[in-house]
Amino acid sequence: MISNIVLTGFMGTGKSSVGKELSKIRGMTFVDTDDEIAKRYGPIDKIFGDHGEEYFRECERLIVRQVASLSAVVIATGGGAVLDPRNVEVLSDSGEIFCLVASPKEIVKRLTKDKGIKIRPLLISENPFGAIHELLADRQNIYEQFAQFETGGKSPLEIALKINAVINDKN
Ligand code: S3P
């Protein structure tokens, strides 16, 4: 039996909305590392602005360790959390990691719809599409180490049901 379920993947791939659906299906508590960071340290864009990315990653590492110590939770990570192998280690020790994927076009569409680009410091650029392409290419090898779920054209509930079926097959 796996204890926690961890959802990772690039910004705008739907980790939080899928995670909430999955937590309902499985009767587990949903935790979002970005929300926990914001609760403890303040808004993410302000952390980046005031202290830089390295400091943000330190906050993220502490929160990842904390949420990974919980049990029976569905964890949605920030898209960059798995760039740090120490986070991957604690998260995989705590449960199973699934990665949500979407095309750059879909990501831009989703993030533009909810003004998500403005609150994501790594995407603030004259050319957010280019920034997304570049970051995705840099991170491809990292995301590929996890079971991947394509999210394009599917609802969060559909994706959650798919992941749930995979988990049920394994147990
Ligand atoms: C980041 C993703 C964001 C947030 C921060 C950095 C990243 O979370 O943690 O802006 O490096 O991919 P979401 O993936 O929830 O947008």
Image (tube, rainbow, N blue to C red):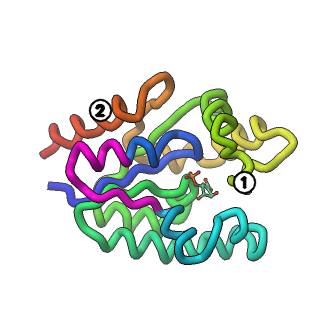
Tag 2 residue:
162
Q: Give the residue furthest to the right.
A: 126
The amino acid type of the residue labelled 2 equals Lys
Residue at the farthest top position: 153
| 119 sits to left or right of 8 | right
Q: Residues within 10 Å of mark 1 (few under 14, many from 20)?
A: some
Indicate if the residue with disc 1 has its beta carbon within 8 Å of ligand 1: yes
Q: In the rendered structure, does residue 155 fall within the stretch colored magenta?
A: no
Mark 1 sits on what residue?
122
- Which residue occupies 41% across, 38% down? 148
39 or 138: which is nearer to us? 39
Residue 129, quarter of the rendered image: top right
Q: Residue at x 57, y 41 (%)?
A: 12
Q: Amino acid at mark 1?
A: Leu
Residue 136: where, in percent of width, then height? 64, 42
Between the C-alphas of marks 1 and 2, the distance is 30 Å
Along the line of sight, the residue nearer the viewer: 25 or 121:
25
Q: Is residue 3 above or below residue 125?
A: below
Regarding ligand 1, which quadrant of the image does it lie in?
Answer: bottom right
Query: Dot 2 lies on which element?
Result: helix
Badge 2 density bin: few <14, some 14–19, many ≥20, Cα 10 Å: some
What span is colored magenta in the figure?
20-32
Q: Residue at x 30, y 44 (%)?
A: 22
Q: Give the image location of residue 127, x and y in percent.
A: 83, 39
The quadrant holding residue 66 is: bottom left
Q: Is residue 82 above or below residue 151?
A: below
Q: Which label number is shown at residue 55?
A: none
- Residue 21 is situated, as x and y percent measured from the top left of the image, at 33, 42
